[in-house]
Image (cartoon, helix red, strand yellow):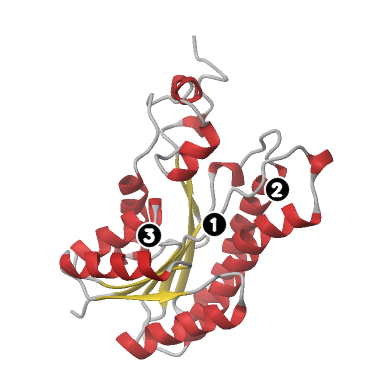
Amino acid sequence: MPAPVVLITGALTGIGRATALAYARDGADVVVSGRHQDEGDALAEELRSNGGRSLFVMADVRHDAEVRHLVDRTVEHFGRLDVAFNNAGTEGRLTPVTEVTDEAYEGTFDTNVKGTLLSLKHEFRAMQAQDGGGSIINVSSIYGLMGYPDYALYVGSKHAVVGITKAAALEGAKHGIRVNAVAPGYTRTAMYERTTGSDAVRDAVNSVLPMGRPGAPEEIAAAVQYLGSGKAGYLTGQTLTLDGGLMSGWPLFPTS
């Protein structure tokens, strides 16, 4: 059976990087994308050293022509597109609603929402033209399933990803294209370091996590691989939460 062709946006750090490495170790052909050429080329070389064929294509998901080129280059180089992980995202500027600006809105929604839509647009185009369809995984967040003060822009953008995932799944089903999302909770990434800010805050966060720790990027990557695989062949339109139990309600609603 030929190796799957996997495309990952926002692949240079964190969850995207961990997912690219996991797929490469399993022998997949991996196209990684981001906005920094030198880092991207270095990652592609690292992926090749881990056993898979790899290509870096620089692209900014906020721009239609760049996303089109990214998907077209993937198909030209590897012949098809089997799995896409739309991981590019930003926390944007975290402000109360009274301080929201046009610039802050665009900075968050252009990447998290428009970028997801443009990626789906061109991934659908490629997958509809090939036998077997494909699997697409979008990245949302636990904040796509609940609210949080001062995070209105980020929360709104990640709620949008959940809705877009459901709508796209309905469109893709007749073409054999499955569309799902992952909703990570606190995960050890650069974003986690930025938004928590200090060891004291991180200790406080860990104290309310049922498992007592943040997730590892590799744990999210494993879920992405499952959603992208034939083992999830009847799963579409769903958002898989990976939060160590936080959204289950504890300790906000203790049982004793």
In this picture, is 111 found above or below 198?
below
In the rendered view, would you say 78 is above or below 217? below
What's the CA distance linking mark 1 and mark 2?
13 Å
Q: On the image, numbered disc 2 is attached to which residue?
A: 153
Question: Where is residue 161, by image quadrant?
Answer: bottom right
* Front-most of residues 70 and 162: 70
Residue 227, disc: 3
How far apart, in angstroms, are the residues tagged by discs 2 and 3? 27 Å
Badges 2 and 3: C-beta atoms under 8 Å apart?
no
Tag 3's secondary structure? Answer: helix
Residue at x 30% of width, y 64% of height: 43
Kind of residue indicated by mark 2:
Leu
Q: Which residue is mark 1?
A: 89
Quadrant where the N terminus sits is bottom left
Q: CA distance from mark 1 to mark 3?
A: 19 Å
Crowdedness near tag 2: few (<14), some (14–19) or many (≥20) residues, C-alpha within 10 Å = many
Residue 185 visible somewhere in the drawing: no
Q: Residue at x 58, y 83 (%)?
A: 65
Q: Amino acid at mark 1?
A: Gly
